[in-house]
Amino acid sequence: MITRDDVDTAVPRISGHVRRTPLAEVEAGSFPGQVWLKCEFMQHTGSFKARGAFNRILTARELGDLDPAVGIVVASGGNAGLANAYAAATLGVPATVYLPTNAPPVKVAMLRALGARVVSHGEEYAEAYEAAVKHAADTGAVYCHAYDQPEIAAGAGTLGLEILSQLGGENVDTIVLAVGGGGLMAGVAAAVEGIARVVAVEPEAIPTLHAALAHGGPVDVAVSGIAADSLGARRIGDIAYAVAVRTGVHSVLVRDEDIIAARKALWEHRRIAVEHGTAAALAALTTGVYRPQPGERVVVVLCGANTNPADLA
């Protein structure tokens, strides 16, 4: 569980290490209400994950848990792996990243370019994760979870406080964002609790939060579809579920074809190239599964840009 206090504490800790990303107002009449795009895809390593990575590693250093000779370990070939490798390199500590053996060579190359030691293990992410946890236990490395750790989620939540700062808390009614494991949703919902509502958007093919809310707790779901590379967690994190229930997060689902259309629209009309998972947030508005009320002030978080733009031309 995390609260606004955890997010407030993260702000000065990561200040100077992360970018304050811009807000772009959408043309009047595009949607009901007034809509802004939070351009978090411009963050270091191309996603919001850098916020949590710095908060996790810096907290460990403050507590005396970070051995500078051993560093950190993470299991992720995606945005979490890149962000933690970048944060470790910036802070001058080693990073070990565990990947399944079928990880794309381009991701391996990117991680190595950031100075990370890459270990291939197992055919699925779950096997790489287990090996990374064992590595942490055996070596004393700080384990950085992709989403389900208090410091990770609180760091991500600084994005929510940044939105409130940029627009003024009284000028934000709703924040719409995509959900995979739920770290971003948990952090932002905690940050804006009592101020603005959070709408959590998931692909119909990977409804981790939606299924958990229906079931009464986190539950495994099948992972498939166009956004599986970035929103492909099998279940919502425990922290995310607890925060969603406490703060009344509103859950909606979008279809793969609508995610694809929203991503193309961002490129064609605004020359913004984002991941399919990121585009899911905007798809909630373009399809009307979330329809703002007249006068409602809505921020749509565009959280990641690590995509192959070849199919956007």
Image: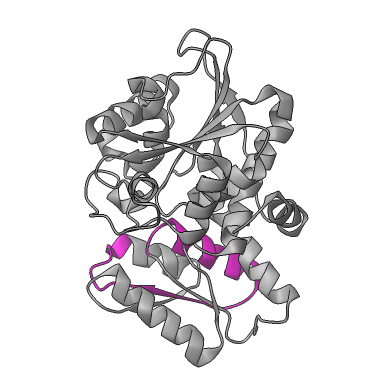
Residue 82 image point, x, y percent: 47, 61
Q: Residue furthest top?
A: 29
Which residue is nearer to you in this view: 280 or 241? 241
Q: Report the label total.
A: 0
Which residue is nearer to you in this view: 57 or 116? 57
**Identity of the residue drawn at 69% across and 41% down:** 161
Against 261, residue 273 (above or below) is below
Against 229, residue 273 (above or below) is above
Judge left or right: residue 176 versus residue 236. right
The answer to whether residue 100 is magenta is yes
Judge left or right: residue 18 versus residue 198. right
Residue 222 image point, x, y percent: 23, 55
**Identity of the residue drawn at 28% across and 72% down:** 100
The answer to whether residue 245 is magenta is no
Judge left or right: residue 297 versus residue 290. right
Residue 113 image point, x, y percent: 46, 66
Against 64, residue 106 (above or below) is above
Residue 168 visible within the image: no
Which residue is nearer to you in this view: 238 or 270? 238
Q: Residue furthest bottom?
A: 138
In magenta, the rendered stretch is: 77-106
**Identity of the residue drawn at 73% across and 34% down:** 165
Q: Quadrant of the C terminus?
A: top left
Residue 162, by quadrant, is top right
Residue 310 image point, x, y percent: 27, 39
Q: Quadrant of the N terminus?
A: bottom right
Against 129, residue 289 (above or below) is above
Q: Residue furthest front?
A: 216
Residue 281 visible within the image: yes
Model colouring: one colour
Residue 234, by quadrant, is bottom left
